[in-house]
Image (cartoon, rainbow, N blue to C red):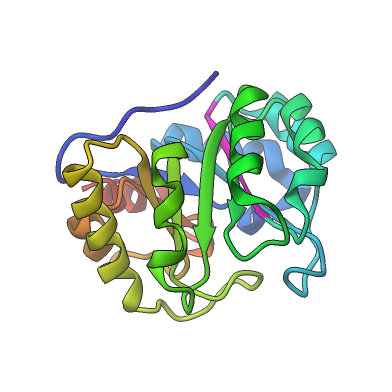
Amino acid sequence: MNWLPRPAEGCAWVAPSVLSADFSRLEDDLQSMTAAGADFLHLDVMDGHFVPNITFGPFICGALRKLSTLPLDAHLMISRPDNYLEPFAKSGIDGLTIHVEADADVSSTLARIGELGMKRGISLKPDTPLEKILPYLNQLDLVLVMSVEPGFGGQVFNPGAVEKIAELDRRRAAESLEFLINVDGGINGETGPLCREAGADILVSGSWLFGAEDRPGRVQVLKG
């Protein structure tokens, strides 16, 4: 399994959001991000129900596995993630993140993700209180803090995410837990360092990275 430990203090791993890549030249775009120093690839899976948009599923995740050696973390913005765990495991991805707001038994779904050999992640929308995920922290390998509403790119960063990250970092230290803190939505050269300084370990960025001429430079800005 491809996965990374926590980065050095004050630094962050960088995860380009594949949905912002040029799918007509996808392999070139992914290789470019690897060469630029990216650490993870972030895969946004949308079902048209939990969020209005539809993207891709396990089949495309399997194709992406063949195109990159980087760890693949799939963010499931779908209503019934428990119905699709086995296909995603077979696709070869490394981590699977579900939403606490999804229509599923969160604890048993996380347990099954682990049984299938994937890292266990949970995400919450900007308006969802952090308390909703606290009962599951000891089951997790990753927490994904959404700094925009899931389902659409190009939104403005919600500054409330910074306090959620800081509180997660405090609880992680107090309870001697090892989960990674990931943040997604509106991440750029200004918001990324704010999240990193608050305790985020992974910064997901889409168009700000894929639209750059100097991709290595922008990756380094986020890494710190």
Q: Is residue 213 visible?
A: no
**Residue 54 drawn at (x, y percent):** 81, 64
**Residue 202 drawn at (x, y percent):** 37, 47
Query: Is residue 71 in the magenta section?
Result: yes
How many numbered marks appear?
A: 0
> In the rendered view, would you say 117 is above or below 40?
above
Task: Report the residue at 81% width, 70% height from top.
Answer: 49
Task: Report the residue at 53% width, 30% height from top.
Answer: 71
Q: Is residue 59 visible?
A: yes
Image quarter of the N terminus = top right
**Residue 222 drawn at (x, y percent):** 30, 52
From the viewer's perspective, tell me whether residue 114 is left or right of residue 172.
right
Task: Report the residue at 82% width, 68% height from top.
Answer: 48
Query: Is residue 80 in the magenta section?
Result: no
Q: Main secondary structure of the magenta part?
A: strand
Q: Nearer the viewer, residue 136 or 161?
A: 136
**Residue 175 drawn at (x, y percent):** 23, 42
Q: Nearer the viewer, residue 79 or 201?
A: 79
Looking at the rendering, the stretch of residues picked out in magenta corresponds to: 70-76
> In the rendered view, would you say 40 is above or below 5?
below
From the viewer's perspective, tell me whether residue 72 is left or right of residue 185.
right
Task: Report the residue at 46% width, 48% height from top.
Answer: 136
> In the rendered view, would you say 123 is above or below 117?
below
From the viewer's perspective, tell me whether residue 35 is left or right of residue 119.
left
